[in-house]
Structure formats: C-alpha cells, structure tokens
Amino acid sequence: MEEKKRQHSPIKVGCSIVFVTIHLIILLLILTMCRVPKRDYEPYLTAGEQYYQEILGVSPTIASGKYYADEGGGFSITVTFSPEQMKNPLVKQFTKNQSELSFRGTSTESNIVGISEEATKNLEAANSFHEFNRPVSKMLDDLLKNDNPDSELSKSLEEREIFMCSTDLSFWKKVFNNYERLKDKPFEERFAWLKDQTDDKTFFFLSTEIAGSEFLFETLKEDAFPVDVFPVGTIFKMKGILDNKHILYQSDENYQLVESKNDYPVTY
C-alpha cells in the first residue's frame, strides 16, 4: 500500500505544479490586460510637464497609475509638488496650498469621426491638457460672467452665454497672471481685455438654436448673433431644433459670417 502511494506521489506533484502554473499564467494575463499601456498615459506626462513649465515655471512629479482603476478604462494621474516648489507664490495660488493634485485619466485618442486631421490633432492635445488646466479654466469662466445686465454691452448680448476657446498655453498663462487684477473689474473691462487676447488659436465661441431646420441657417444667420460686438474670427454655431443639424460660422474682416474652417473647436 505504501509503495502504491509512493508511486502516485510524483503524479500528484506533477499535477499540482501544472495546476499552479496555469493559475499563474491566468493571473499574469489578467494583470497584463489591466495594465495601462504607455500610449494611454504618456500624453498626460508630456502635456503636464509642458503645462507646468509654461504656467508656473516648475516641474512637479507627474505619475500615472500602473493599472486601470475602473471598467471605463480610467486610471489615476497624480501631480506632486516638492516642498521647495510649494514656496513659490504662483504654485500656492494655483494649488490652493495642496502639494498633491490628482484626477482620472483616460485614453486621449480621438473617437470623433468625420473631422479633419488638424481638428483631430487639436482634440487629442486638448484631451491631454484639459485636466491640468481646470483651475485656470475656472478663472476664465469667472472673468466671462456678465454681472452687469443693465449695461449697453449686456443688452447687445441678449443674455447669451459667452465661451472662449484656446489651444495656446501663453493665453492661459495670461489669464492666470491677470486674474486677481481683473476679477473685480466691471464686465465691460474684463470683456475688453479678453478681446485683446484673441488670435487664430484663441477665440470667442457663441451658440444658438433656431426653431427650424438647416435650410433656414443662411437666411437667419445675420440676425442670429451680435457679430460686430466680437472680434474677427469669433465662431458662431447655429443649430436647428427640428433636424438637430448645425453649422459653424466665423466672422471675417467685414464682420460677415462665413462658414468656419475650424470644423471642431476645442479648448484646453
């Protein structure tokens, strides 16, 4: 009997090794599938380094989580400022005295079809910079708040919500550096300052809906927006409620609306 047990022992040992090996292979496959690939996290590391150098003049440590954190393909991005960097007044203002910032990252690759190669490139860059720029983006929102509804400027805007788009880091640096000076100024003064910052990468964006279809756009476009209030190059979006289609127009040197060459405006 003991001899039979000894004869079967090598088989049992062999089966155990195979069993453990299979489980280890499955575990390694799962870990490999859950690991964030370089193509997903690297754009954040590159954009973050560029962003903080331009806006704050420092290089904090930017790290990505090694594994996906949720089923939606999200992973963590963490920004850590050193004690020496935290002594910088600009860093203190930006971080609100928090030495570590974090957000959820996802793939920055474009999933929008039918747009130009340039628009795709701008969209993917915007996806990389957007979360880093969120504090300054909120500052811009504050500067665009129309808190003087009785002014002539406000009346011409007809209670429209105004947006600005920019893929130029130097613009966002100006917003950050001038925010404290401008935030308590009248809306007209803030609006005038923002108008002076516009160029081909930084522009105002307005949108309106019409109770009709796309065929009415050409007829109504001149009366749909206060075109002359905004700088040349402002983008105006008209959307038809009935057919859910839209056209992007852009003001030219004569403040006439022409179809925009920017087929998918984005912002950092």
Image: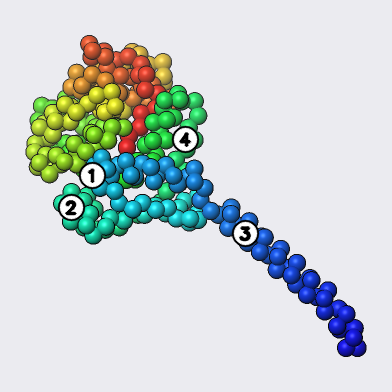
- Determine whether the residue tagged by mark 4 lies in a helix, strand or loop: loop
- Determine whether the residue tagged by mark 2 lies in a helix, strand or loop: loop
Q: Position of residue 221 (x, y in %)?
A: 31, 17
> In whole angstroms, how far apart are the C-alphas of marks 2 and 4?
36 Å
> In whole angstroms, how far apart are the C-alphas of marks 1 and 3?
41 Å
Between 253 and 86, the residue placed more toward the observer is 86
Res. 145 in view: no
- Determine whether the residue tagged by mark 1 lies in a helix, strand or loop: loop
Mark number, residue 110: 4
For image coordinates 46% across by 51% down, the residue present is 74
Binning the other alpha carbons within 10 Å of mark 3 as few (below 14), some (14 to 19) or many (20 upward) gives: few
Give left or right: position of 136 versus 45.
Answer: left
Mark number, residue 57: 1
Marks 1,2: beta carbons within 8 A: yes
Give left or right: position of 119 versus 167.
Answer: right
- Compare marks 1 and 3 and give the one earlier in the sequence: 3
